Amino acid sequence: MTETQNCKLLYFAWVREKMGRSSEDIALPSSVVTVSDLLSWLKAKGGEYSSAFENEKVIRVALDQAHAGLDTKIGKTREIALFPPVTGG
């Protein structure tokens, strides 16, 4: 099956800096089912993706503005935010 899903990726903080942009519209392949699949797929794209998602375990993700774990299914999500852990002071 080669069906794809279009969604908007939003990048924040140092993820945005490494990507060189704040967002992009992207077609996710059908093999990307979970948040973990997404991070692995992005990292494998190489270049700035590889740099930004080098350590997948530190990336936080929100699907349609709701925080999601690595095993969360993406489903029909339209917007995916990717950001580093938030630290307080």
Image (cartoon, rainbow, N blue to C red):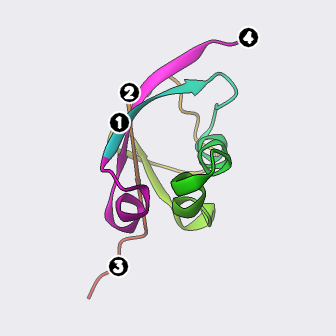
State which region is magenta: 1-22
Identify the amino acid type marked 1: Asp
Q: Position of residue 32 (x, y in %)?
A: 64, 32
Q: Residues within 10 Å of mark 4 (few under 14, many from 20)?
A: few
Residue 33 in the image: above or below residue 54: above
Q: Magenta stretch: residue 13 in it?
A: yes
- Position of the C terminus, as image quadrant, is bottom left
Identify the amino acid type marked 2: Arg
* Viewer-closest of 87 and 38: 38
Identify the amino acid type marked 4: Met
Which label number is shown at residue 1? 4
Earlier residue among tags 1 and 4: 4
| Residue that badge 2 annotates | 78
| Residue that badge 1 annotates | 64
| Disc number lying in front (3 or 4) | 4
| Residue that badge 3 annotates | 87
Identify the amino acid type marked 3: Thr
